[in-house]
Amino acid sequence: MNAMKLGWFSELNSELWPGVALSLEVEEVLHSERSSFQDILVVKTLTHGKALMLDGVIQCTEKDEMSYHEMISYLPLCSHPKPQNVLIVGGGDGGVAREVAKHPDVERVTLVDIDDRVIEVCKQYLPRLSLGLNNPYVNIIVGDGFEFLNHHQGEFDVIITDSSDPIGPAENLFKHAYYQLLKSALKPGGIIASQAGTAWANLDQVCSTFQHCKAVFPVATYAVTSVPTYPTGQIGFVLGSLTEQTNFAEPMKIFSGKDLDRMSLMYYNDKVHRAAFALPRFVEKALNNA
Ligand code: SPM
C-alpha cells in the first residue's frame, strides 16, 4: 500500500507499522512497474536524492542508504578473521555488494536476488548503489535465495541477507528453516547477518528472528543502526556465528582513518561498530526472554 498525493510519497503499512507513515516530497517519478514479484518505484525526492520503493515500502534513499549498507556489511565482515567468500541473499539494488567488495580480504562475492527487474531498474536509475553490481568480483544469480542455499553446503565465510520486510517475496527469509539453511551453507567459523526489523515498531518480529538465529547458532546477537527514512528511524540486524569465541561487539578487523577514507566509508568505523550492540533495556529484556 502506498500513497502519492500532492507530490508526496507516503509509506503506509498498516500491518508492519500501524498508525505511522513517513513521507518524502517527490520531484519526479522516474520509474514505476509491477514485476513478477512486486511493485517497483523509483522517484527523485526533493531532499533525499533518488529513492527505491518495493511494494510501497522505502528500501533506500541516496541520502541515508550508507548507514544501512555499511552496517549490514561491515558488522559481520569485521567480526570474521578472514571473510574471503561472501554470499548476499537479496540486495538486488547493489548497495551491499558495493560495500562487501571493498573489504580487503574478500575475494569472491555471490549475490542471489529473486527479482531481475529490481537489478535492472537499479542499474538504470540508481548507479551510486548499483555500481556494486558491475564489480568483476560480484557474481549475480537471479533466483530464490532459499533454493540457492538448499544446493550450496559449506561454501561461504559470511552470508548477508539484505531483504525487504517479511510480507511479500521475502517472507521465507524470516523463518526457522531459512536459518538452518544459512548454517549449512557456511564454512566452519562462518558468520551470518540478516535484516531483522526495528524494535520500536516490530519488537515481536525482532524477537522471533533473533529466536531463529539463536536456535541455530552458538552465538547470536542483535545490533542496530539509524536510517532516518525507515519507520522509527532505526533498523536492526541479527548476527550469528558458528564459532563460540566470536564477540560481535568487538571488531576483529579495525580500519584506520586512511583505510576508511580509501574505502569511502561515511558511517562505519570501529566505534560505531561497538555502539551498534549497546541496546536499550526494553530490547535487551525482550531478547533475553526470546
Ligand atoms: N539494499 C536495501 C534493501 C533494504 N532492505 C531493508 C528494507 C527494510 C524497509 N523497511 C524497514 C521496516 C523496519 N521494520
Image (cartoon, rainbow, N blue to C red):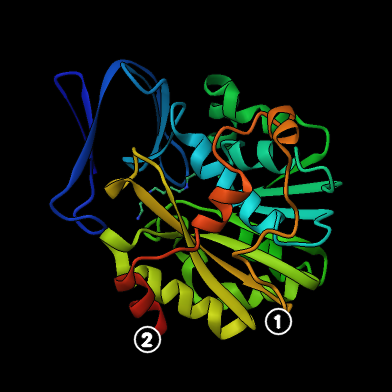
Left or right relative to 88: residue 125: left
Residue type at mark 2 is Asn
Residue, disc 2: 289
Left or right relative to 215: residue 10: left
Left or right relative to 110: residue 248: left
Quarter containing the C terminus: bottom left
Quarter containing the N terminus: top left
Q: Residue 192 at what x, y percent from top left?
A: 65, 65
- Vertical placement of 53 versus 213: above or below? above
Q: Residue 166 at what x, y percent from top left?
A: 40, 61
Q: Looking at the picture, tell me which residue is in the foreground, 184 or 187.
A: 187
Left or right relative to 169: residue 98: right
| Crowd around label 2: few <14 · some 14–19 · many ≥20 (10 Å) | few
Q: Is residue 50 visible?
A: yes
Q: Residue 284 at what x, y percent from top left?
A: 38, 74
Residue type at mark 1 is Glu
Please tell me which residue is depicted at 48% across the width and 35% down the height of the picture. 65
Please tell me which residue is depicted at 26% across the width and 59% down the height of the picture. 201
Pointer 1 or 2: first along the chain: 1
- Vertical placement of 273 versus 261: above or below? below
| Crowd around label 1: few <14 · some 14–19 · many ≥20 (10 Å) | few
Q: Residue 39 at what x, y percent from top left?
A: 38, 38
Q: Looking at the picture, tell me which residue is in the foreground, 223 or 180.
A: 223
Residue, disc 1: 244
**Mark 2: which secondary structure?**
loop
Q: How many marks?
A: 2
**Mark 1: which secondary structure?**
loop
